[in-house]
Amino acid sequence: MSGSLRVALSVVIATVAGCGEIEPVEPPGFADAIALPTPVDLSPDPHVLELDLVARETSLELVPAGPTAMWGFDGHVPGPLLEAEVGDRLIVHFHNELPEETTVHWHGIRVPNEMDGVPDHTQHAVQPGDSFEYRFELPDEGLYWYHPHVRSAGQAAAGLYGAIVVRAPDEPVVDEAVLVLSDAAVGDDGALLPADSGGELATLFGREGNVVLVNGRVRPTIRARVGVPLRLRMVNAAIARYFQLALGTLSFTVIGGDRGLHDGPRVLTRPVLTPGQRLDAIVVPQGSVGQTIALRWIPYDRGFGSTEFRDPEDLLYVELERGPDRAVPMPTIPSRPFEPIVAATPTDLHVELTRNDRDGHLALGFDGVPGWEATPFPARFGEVQRWSFRNTLEWSHPIHLHGFFFQPLDAMGRPTGIWADTIDVPVDGSASFLVRFDERPGLWMIHCHVLDHGDAGMMGMIELSR
């Protein structure tokens, strides 16, 4: 089923045993207000999703002053929602109609190195007027996303991002909505603020927009029936903002994250998504018919000044409609057994996240070296590495590894039971993970996904070889 149908239409979530009746689901068109565009599939093969994707100028209505000129994929912010099944092949004929070079990085997907979208390391940047073909298989279930890796902060802040859903055959059948969370920095005149506004101090903080968005909309409204489970698949596509979420007094039954479904549900009241992370959760709306509850952004302390003088902001409204006469059970969630990475002697890498100057300008980096001066970290096929990050800076740093999933470790060095591709290193704190490298040689990026920080040098490369 296409993405628009999955978002816009109701689907059957259960059949009552013994009587064959169909349980009520969310109202038809319940999420039309946040529906994402879907591409035209050029392939007749049901296991191939082939499409044209164009980066070009567009605009959004974000503030009363008038339209905001932005950039988007196929003229949309976010770009088209790409939907496929595990094992399908994705072919993207990408064309650049922007006034500067760009690429597409497929965040979280285990692509071949030459498809990773990192200029100078995996491909040449796509020049204005030129094209590039991305072609790879989709090996893992989950919610992923795509964005540029040229002038990453500026281009992503301008609107170049989109979501990808890869489905497993046994996924729970339940109404769902894909939420691309982001923000935009807009002036009083409606113009997008320059990517370098605020200078190096703003780079150090990480630029947060003053308008929060869900699927490119400002405070949209969806409808839901009281007592009917609703699956929210969320990605944080903002360049710096951490999204701490609250939905009234409801809890989030978290069933998955960066790499699809977990080994079991985890109940959270205020989940947090760092830039780049994904969250797959089920909520059960409760309240009075006609009541509206708000999905809210709650200020989160990611460092100096990030919670001072800031109030919660409404992201999305949920209007409640009458629920079914009988209780609708939570859908059955398949379990994904978690197998810890085991290595008698993993290779240990200790990295300090640092700040210094280069020629009088701000430079962030690993161990005092900005990414453009750094020597790649070596890795071998089949090697297990244990990465440990120490942060003595005034801001948290979500570290993202390209091309591979890892297992975050707790304070005792034990796997936390999930797979991820992005891990938060808190202020004056540390974080670590285990990763096993498979046989996909090349240079793989590891960087802070506060994209201003990555652009300022907080990144490195891993050189994987036999």
Image (cartoon, rainbow, N blue to C red):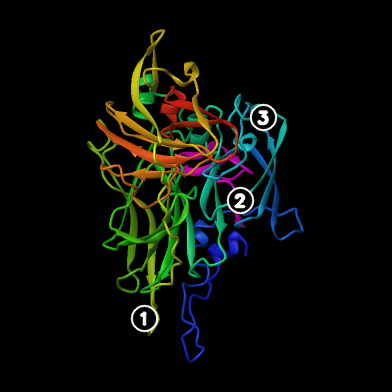
Magenta segment includes 34? no
Q: From the top left corner, tell me how far across and down residue 171 is, in percent.
A: 51, 66
Q: Residue at x 45, y 60 (%)?
A: 336
Q: Which mark is residue 327?
A: 1
Disc 1 marks which amino acid? Ala
How far apart are the alpha carbons under marks 2 and 3? 23 Å
In the rendered image, the quadrant that contains the C terminus is top right
In the rendered image, the residue lying farthest to the right is 44
Label 2 or label 1, whichever comes before in sequence order: 2
> On residue 126, which mark appears?
3
Tell me the magenta residue range: 59-84
Q: Which residue is mark 2?
A: 138
- The alpha-carbon separation of the residues under discs 2 and 1 comes to 37 Å
User: Whole-Å distance between the Cαs marked 3 and 1?
Assistant: 53 Å
Element carrying mark 1 = loop
Dominant SS of magenta comes to strand
